[in-house]
Image (cartoon, rainbow, N blue to C red):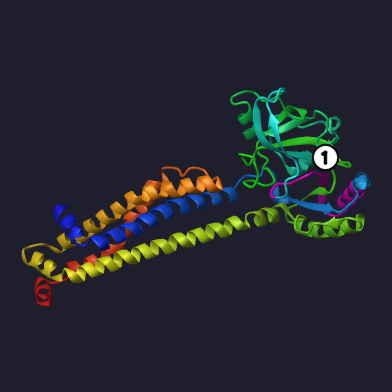
Amino acid sequence: MQVQPVLAALRKHRIATVLIALEIALACAVLCNACFLIMQRVQAMHIVSGVDEDALGTLKLDGFDPEQATDLNARVLSALRGIAGVRAATVVNAVPFSQHAGRAGVFLDADKAQFGGVVEFYLASPGSAEAFGLRLVAGRFPTQEEYAPVGTFVPKDPPVVITRALAEHFWPGENPLGKTFWSGDTFRVIGVLDHLAVPEPGGGEAKDPDWSVYVPAQPGPQFAGRYLVRADPADLPGVMARAREAVLKAAPEAVLDQAQSRTIAELRHSYFLASRVMAGLLAGVVVALLGTTALGIVGLASFWVAQRRKQIGVRRALGATSGDILRYFQIENFLIVTIGIALGMVLAFGINAGLMKFYELPRLPAWYLPVGAVTLWALGQLAVLAPALRAAAVPPVAAMRSA
């Protein structure tokens, strides 16, 4: 079928054609950016923390005198380790999906000329690596003698274990073992972890959720109040309930942070609640917009079918088949949708540029555009199908009589 007659018909209905094309352009732009944002949130919700989430819980105390921190840690750890079902209890400064506690910028040279980025420092007491269930891929964990008292921020020039992502960022393609980096103190890398997510993935300055450093430290005045508990997954809910009671009895002078004193799985669920809500809202917007677009195409096609009954009758009388009529409306709709998609692609990049500028979102990957185009082409063909089939089913005589 020649396209010229279709274009001639569209020029006679410029306003309706432009309105539908603009609606499709808006749908294309919103569809691409909304799907991109949804995928970002879905990927964030499925990040690998690097710890045995199902077997871990944490308790956080506030309001205590730092001068009594050593005694507080001893009392709390003794109470936790005495609970039936507790396999390990240690002091840490943070856990994944909680509040950050040790974020700082680091440099890759002693002169502080080469900035490495902002990373998260996990202070961890002896036994924490095993309690977390961290997986070592190179090097070793700190020995008992390498767990030293904390100074103002970390122990003096400590040996550390970093994640594989951080090692590749610092020294691409090189062996990180034995390397050093600086942030006030000198940090020497003795091991590499598979994963260890920062406490607030996506919410801080770290460019990657695995930019974490494991620092061996002895509990004390500058390192107290956050405790890690490990138990069998089936026993963990009961263990955590007993742990909260035991901690309150062991440290009556402190305040238990109920929101932070939960299992790691519960912290993950709470941390990504806003992301799930946002993803759901965006999905609803996409469905509503696509539905509105489909209804607009159906309405326009139905109107044009009613307006062209005489033309349809003449074409049928001159030998046009039902398939010819059906293809006419499909080609007409395809051209309108294509115009809308072309405008929508430009608009999609414009919206993404605004999001990048004001919300620091990444650039929209180009592959979202063909996916959005195919979706709208398929939607347009499905939406026009019913009106086109009605037009194709009109007998020539009936069409001529209705003229």
Percent of width and height locating residue 81: 87, 49
* Residue segment shown in magenta: 72-97
Q: Quadrant of the C terminus?
A: bottom left
Give the vertical position of 206 relative to 376 (above or below): above
Is 363 on the left-hand or right-hand side of 235? left
Label 1: state its secondary structure. Answer: loop
* Amino acid type, callout 1: Ser
Count the marks: how many?
Answer: 1
Q: Residues within 10 Å of mark 1 (few under 14, many from 20)?
A: many
Q: Quadrant of residue 113?
A: top right
Residue wearing tag 1 = 125
* Residue shown at the point (48%, 42%) measured from the top left: 363
Task: Check if residue 168 falls in the magenta segment.
Answer: no
Give the vertical position of 353 relative to 261 (above or below): above
Percent of width and height locating residue 135: 69, 37
Is 132 on the left-hand or right-hand side of 7? right
